[in-house]
Image (spheres, helix red, strand yellow):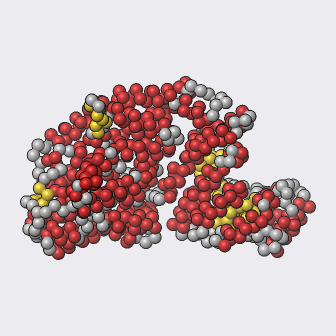
Amino acid sequence: MLFSKVFHQFNQNAVKVSSNTVILSLREGYIALIPFFIVASVITLLNQWFNLADKGGEHEYLNDFNQLIWALLPLITLISFSYYLSKNLRLHTIAAPVLVLTCFSVSTGYITAQMENVLVNNRSGVLYSILMPILCCYLLKYFSSFSALKIVGISTISLFLRKHLNLIFPYLLVSIITLMLIPFITNLGEFFVAYLINLDQSPSILDKLSLQMISANLLWFVGIHGDNAYHILTPVTYTDYDVFNGLSSYNFFSTFVLLGGTGCLWGLIVACFMIKNAEHERSIARISMPLAVFNISEVMIYALPIVFNPFFLVPFLLTPILNGVISYSLIDSGLLILNTNEHIPWFTPVILSGWMVTHSWTGVALQLGLILINAIVYYPFVLANKRHNITGKALDMLVKRYSAGESIEGQSEQSFARSHSLNQLEQYSLKSVTDALNSGALSLYYQPKIDPKTQDIVGFEALLRLIQADGVVVGPWFLETLEQHNLMYIIDDFVIDQLEVDLSNFAAQGFKPNISFNISPQNLLAGGYKRVVNAFARYPNQVEVEILESSYIEDFEATVKLVNFLNKHHIKCAMDDFGTGYSCLSVLSRLNVNTIKLDRSLLPEGDNKKSVVLYQHLAKICEELGFNVVAEGVESQMHEEVVKKAQIHSAQGFLYNKALPFNVAMALLNPKN
């Protein structure tokens, strides 16, 4: 019981860590760098295989390729992390990274000037590639919130220009603070590293192995290229030594410790395939396998992700330690005989490297045994990650739900240029929308659809909500303004992506609820239907797109074709708010939707017998024409009685439930609750 409580608390804390803005930004930044990591590793591998540089001629520059590329790694990491952190903090994604890059270049010693030459010292920059973006971006966000530091208020100039002019004073303050603070941080760090090294002037081989295994993997875990960083930060006596006579530390790690790359990833890959229904984990494992053959681990580390993922901290540190201790003990006891002094490149595949070091199947058997042990160690943690962590597209949506305002601001300069002649009121309106979205978070809430007779839940409608900075949840009051500025596609993209994630989460718990949702008719007809099909075709007959009657009126033939296309891919369609505007009974005979949603305005108010008769006959007509009928706006017992008499089997409204957060809607489906 105690273990269960502790593990539950760990899961809650782990999810909070995984969804932290800094962690999300690091994840995005490193995923963006995966092509760089892979291409750089492959070019290094090919160069060593075919000795291209040693052949001279045009390819002689490849002698320095590895050193130059990894010397640039701190700078590349800094730029990528700065971009995504500034995006997620709703800072400008060019202005903020430029500030970070400037402070990093002039204050850390990474770039220095000597006479007419500019030199790069990656030893000085490796840790600041993570620290500097955090320091500068958060300071910039803090100072940008002060009205006193703004040069320009709301005026006739564009939002884009105004936003950048108002960055001048915050920019200046961040630069001054950073330039004053970094030398003290540098001195403190150097003192700490020197102190650790001086603790033991004559470390044993096991001390060196343990320090390297733990330190390098910890650096990887926090998003820093651990192997390179460790070699940069520590003296050569801790990185280049013989573990046994004829077995260098390089060969020991490449052959017996890092099987498949950092973190012993062959064991992790095997563990991913051992777990049923682990779609995300298995897909990443499949992508990683060809690269793991050559001990390239970046895809698994950054895409699963392992970086800053609390579920993987223990096995990520434990597996290399186990491999090192077991291998060291077997060699030291004489049970494993070494038969080579040759250099074994880090990219040599497992099994082949085991044979090359021992010239015996015992080396191969040891590697396979270690992989099995690693898989057993990883298995419960991969299972916990699958059950409790937020990965894949769910993590992307954590970012997107906060970034709608920034996306709209990114288009606002074009909007301003197109609509400069619009009156001042409209400019204020768009500014109020972007301010509200930047300070809050978009979310999908779910209003249950109830069978009035049985009171069973027969489905949900997904409704957009804005969670304000003070925690108050409000409806999407901003849609009309966005429609005026042709920016509704940003909201539609969010709704589709978030609903796709939520459907996956419903399915993971064994539920397949029918869910309807709204999308802008213009975007749907202009190509949004393709996104709908791509997102929901794998949930056949479970998703229903609500279409306004005005869509048929504006372009009947196009709407009919659209509905047929969606039905062909097992996505249902409903006519929303029937009974308002230009509703006409004659149009019912030509509709090809699956469902008619009767607007709340059709329900009688007070003792209006004519309204009751009209409602009942309208429902009867729709049913006989083959439509499913949903009653909207059921808010009283009287409304429910009318709906029951109309033989309607699906109703929604405040009488049953308001729109609910996802976890509450999920709980309603659980018979235990």
Q: Quadrant of the N terminus?
A: bottom left
As drawn, the residue found furthest toward the front would be 57
The answer to whether any part of residue 338 appears in the image is yes
Question: x, y percentage for residue 225?
Answer: 31, 50
Question: x, y percentage for residue 180?
Answer: 35, 27
- The residue located at (23%, 60%) in the rendering is 51
Q: Is 343 placed above or below 481 here?
A: below
Q: Is 622 placed above or below 105 here?
A: below
- The residue located at (36%, 40%) in the rendering is 131
Left or right, 194 with respect to 9, comes to left
Question: x, y percentage for residue 275?
Answer: 40, 70
Who is closer to the viewer here, 241 or 601?
241
Who is closer to the viewer here, 398 or 427?
427
Left or right, 489 with respect to 47, comes to right
Q: Could you tell me how many numbered marks the image carries?
A: 0
Who is closer to the viewer here, 306 or 510?
306
Left or right, 220 with respect to 402, comes to left
Who is closer to the viewer here, 224 or 74?
74
Question: x, y percentage for residue 221?
Answer: 33, 52
Where is residue 194, by image quadrant? top left
The answer to whether any part of residue 670 appears in the image is no
Left or right, 222 with respect to 12, comes to left
- The residue located at (20%, 50%) in the rendering is 211
- The residue located at (18%, 57%) in the rendering is 250
Q: Quadrant of the C terminus?
A: bottom right
